[in-house]
Amino acid sequence: MQRICSSAARIAVCALLAGATSACAAGRVDQAPPMALGGATPAPLGFLELCERAPEECTSQSGANGRLTPGDADTIRHMARSQFWSAAFQMQAAAPSSVGSRAFAETVIGSDHAGSRDRGPGVAASRGSVVGDLALTAELRHLLDTVNSRINGSIVQRSDRSLYGVADYWATPIGSGARAGGDCEDYVLEKRRALIGAGVPAAALSIAIVKTDWNEVHAVLLVATEKGEIVLDNLKPRLSFWTEKHYRWLERQAAGAPLQWVSVAEVAGQR
């Protein structure tokens, strides 16, 4: 997805946020209400391509070192491929262009697909909210903060175009042999991988797509706890509850189901 996922010039500071009652001024809150969810929506095409290429990144299974059986891996690949082309053809039907399917798929991967609220026909309704049962202990806070800071410092912000020659490519760049480069979804995937490796249940972790104050599409990682969902972010590195973020929440993974994505219901005050 085309977006500027990190920029030092764009990192918000408290003094620029309107209102002395903002979370920045008020300090850390103790908990947050569940995020209200809207209808089911197709996953970002770049994510689905990742799931077909690396199905181990798209499972809620935490055991066995995250390894999948060949059958489970094939199931994820099949589901991802099916969803990819379903979403691509829905978008093609809604577009005025008549380009071929392969070229169209390459085009929509580079479009602002993840930020779109208009997903086309054939999307079932699925409303609810996310409530976690993971205890938000001091140890967990420390782990989340450590992983967030380490990954943020381990990846150099670079566009997918400069790295891979395409507009959108989801990857886990750490350990590639060179200094890791990537954009926001790559930070998210590495944080998810690190937390699962540290023992956090994969079912408690969800990728979310937002729009920033600058109307840019951005990805963050959510951790569902008993006190509410915590955000791990490469733009604003302080841990916070989702309600503290000055973002417009667009869509996210359904808790415990990486291949199932849902829109986020409008909330009062959301821009």
Image (spheres, rainbow, N blue to C red):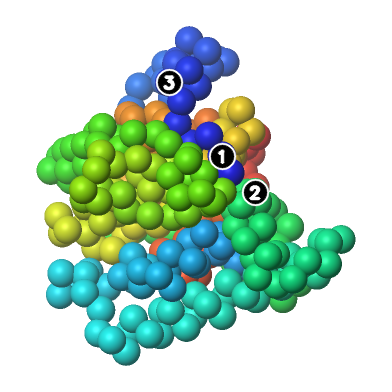
Q: Earlier along the polypeptide chain: callout 2 or callout 3? A: 3
Does the image show residue 151?
no
Residue 152 is situated, as x and y percent measured from the top left of the image, at 30, 35
**What residue did someone put label 2 on?**
112
The amino acid type found where label 3 is placed reads: Ala
Residue 232 in the image, given as x and y percentages of width and height:
35, 41
- Label 1 element class: loop
Q: Amino acid at mark 1?
A: Arg
Q: Secondary structure at mark 2?
A: loop
Question: Where 112 falls versus 62 (above or below)?
Answer: above
Please name the residue that numbered disc 3 is placed on.
8
**Amino acid identity at mark 2:** Asp
Please say if 12 is above or below 87: above
Residue drawn at 61 percent across, 28 percent down = 214
Mark 1 Cα shell of 10 Å, populated few (<14), some (14-19), many (≥20): many
Residues at discs 2 and 1 in contact (Cβ within 8 Å): yes
Dividing the picture into quadrants, the one containing residue 39 is bottom right
- The residue drawn where x is 65% and y is 76% is 86
- Residue depicted at 52% across the width and 13% down the height: 16
The dot on residue 3 is: 1
